[in-house]
Amino acid sequence: MKIFATLSLLIAVLALTPVTAKAGPVSDQKKAYKAIGIDVGKNKPALCRLLSKSEVERVVGKPVRDGTSAGPVIAGCAWHAADGSNDGLLVTRQSRDGWYPPATSKFYKKVSGIGEQAYSNYSEVGYEAAALSAKGVTGVLISGKGTIKAAIDTLRIVLKR
């Protein structure tokens, strides 16, 4: 009986304790951008301003929709093909501690002349290039009819801007 009374008291205390949730910096896109030093505008995600729509369409090889936030847990911009296919371009940036090159992939290659370190890779998702630099880890992923060269060239452009 004493256990039941103690358990009842504990449940009552927990029920009366206000619960407050505080979102972490990665759960809010603007906070995520600010945490890694990217200027955030009011309308367009910061990384969406690094490439024009026509530049993205040249890389993807078809018309794309306007770039949108890549999501609440990643600072990035995604341009999706206008035809509704899975083709598109994704540009991401994260802190330097997110540098994990897929060195075991059979398509992994180190790329010189970009940032401190860089690589390219092909996976079932698409053509990827990423670099470690003072800005953090910047990645480019092209799904659909892309090429490794296009991913590397796009990464070079994004890092310069």
Image (tube, rainbow, N blue to C red):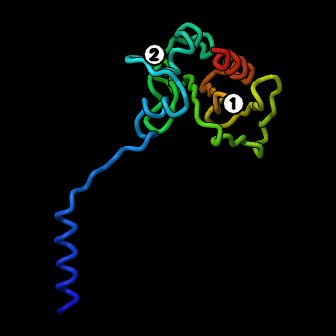
Q: Amino acid at mark 2?
A: Arg
Horizontal and vertical percent position of residue 18: 21, 57
Name the residue rendered at 16%, 71% in the picture: 12
Image marks 1 and 2: residues in contact by CB distance under 8 Å: no
Horizontal and vertical percent position of residue 91: 58, 25
The residue singled out by tag 1 in the image is 130
**Of marks 1 and 2, the one in the foreground:** 1
Secondary element at tag 2: loop
Q: Nearer the viewer, residue 156 or 61?
A: 156
Vertical arrangement, residue 132 with respect to residue 68, above or below: below
Secondary element at tag 1: strand
Q: Nearer the viewer, residue 142 or 110?
A: 110
Name the residue rendered at 19%, 91% in the picture: 2
The residue singled out by tag 2 in the image is 65
Horizontal and vertical percent position of residue 71: 45, 33
Crowdedness of circle 1 by 10 Å Cα count: few (<14), some, many (20+)? many
Q: Earlier in the sequence, mark 1 or mark 2?
A: 2
Q: Amino acid at mark 1?
A: Ala
**Residue 79 in view here:** no
Badge number at residue 46: none
How far apart are labels 1 and 2 at the CA level?
Answer: 23 Å
For residue 156, side relative to residue 28 (left or right): right
Q: Nearer the viewer, residue 32 or 111?
A: 32
The quarter of the picture where residue 31 lies is: top left
Horizontal and vertical percent position of residue 102: 72, 42
The quarter of the picture where residue 27 lies is: top left
